[in-house]
Amino acid sequence: MIDKLEFLIALSRERHFGHAAETCGVTQPTFSAAIKQLEETLGLLLVQRGARFQSFTPEGERVLEWAKRIVNDAQAMRQEVRAIKQGRLTGQLRIAVIPTALAMASVLTTAFRAEHPDVRFVIRSSTSIELLTWIDTLQVDAGITYLDNEKLGHVRTIPLYREQYRLLVASDNPLAARTQVSWAELGELPLCLLSPDMQNRRIIDALLRQAGVPEKAPMLESNSHIVLFTHVLSGQWVSILPSILTDTLCATSALRAIPIEEPAALPIIGLVLPSRDPMPPLTAALAAKTASVAKSLNHRGPDNCG
């Protein structure tokens, strides 16, 4: 039964029988037969079919929610039994992280590994929307994202830090000697920014609007911080990045990260977890370590990359 419920969850992710079968490591006929057997066992039509997958029935949607709960509980039980047998935590933690918080992932995993050296990690960069979908469909165990800017749905949250912003410029830029800039000044600069599918970009757009900056498209958009970083290095562009990233990227005298005056409120970055009980041992340990790291975080002062 558990394997058939896992197939149902895979179908909810892929919305395609062939793709879902591939992710589960079985043939499509085997996959389709398993879904049919599940329907026969429950006495319900779960999936609307035509030539291909169409949708879940209302009953199928309800069974899907139960499937997520049951599969999560089964995974939690396996983890706990393994920890009891071995006397320590082992296994793999899958964490999705928005690009602007990727530097924080190493802080958490390093602190976690000091106590649980046998645990392996998979870190996946994602948008905030993808991250929540992956948590809901059990593709990841936790995520690091914004907690207070856009709706998160039914998840547990642990705040880590407030995001602060820096204007990243080449060291020979006329602004490089400044100790601070205002948001209002940024509208006339040749900005390269993350693309609008990234929540960080939507936050920056809102902060610029609040400062009275007329709306206009940046000179360059990308979903990669490396692209933004290399363009700033060229000396022809500037960018707005969180301080946790400029701390990491500015290990060179070729760049300067200038503090931007703080607005009334800064967004909070934190850990999000599935809101399910019991919590799997690995996830519970990550939650505890995150709370500990949050207490010990010391925010640095103004960046100086030069």
Image: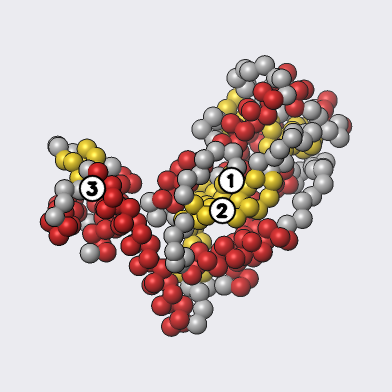
- x, y percent for residue 73: 37, 66
Q: Quadrant of the N terminus?
A: bottom left
Disc 3 or 1, which lies upstream in sequence?
3
Q: Is residue 95 visible?
A: no
User: Is 170 rendered above or below residue 43?
Assistant: above
What residue appears at the point 14 percent right and 37 percent down from the top-left corner? 51
Q: Secondary structure at mark 1?
A: loop
Q: Amino acid at mark 1?
A: Leu
Q: Amino acid at mark 2?
A: Thr
Q: Residues within 10 Å of mark 3 (few under 14, many from 20)?
A: few
Disc 2/disc 1 C-alpha distance (Å): 7 Å
Disc 2/disc 3 C-alpha distance (Å): 30 Å
The residue that disc 3 covers is: 59
Q: Secondary structure at mark 2?
A: strand
Q: Are marks 2 and 3 in contact (CB under 8 Å)?
A: no
Q: Secondary structure at mark 3?
A: helix
Q: Residues within 10 Å of mark 2 (few under 14, many from 20)?
A: many
The residue that disc 2 covers is: 157
Disc 2 or 1, which lies upstream in sequence?
1
Disc 2 or 3, which lies upstream in sequence?
3
Q: Which dot, 3 or 1, sits closer to the camera?
A: 3
What residue appears at the point 33 percent right and 46 percent down from the top-left corner? 13
Q: Residues within 10 Å of mark 1 (few under 14, many from 20)?
A: many
Q: Are marks 2 and 1 in contact (CB under 8 Å)?
A: yes
What residue appears at the point 45 percent right and 81 percent down from the top-left corner? 84
Front-most of 163 and 123?
A: 163
- x, y percent for residue 179: 86, 35
Q: Amino acid at mark 3?
A: Glu
The residue that disc 1 covers is: 147
- x, y percent for residue 102: 60, 49
- x, y percent for residue 206: 64, 28
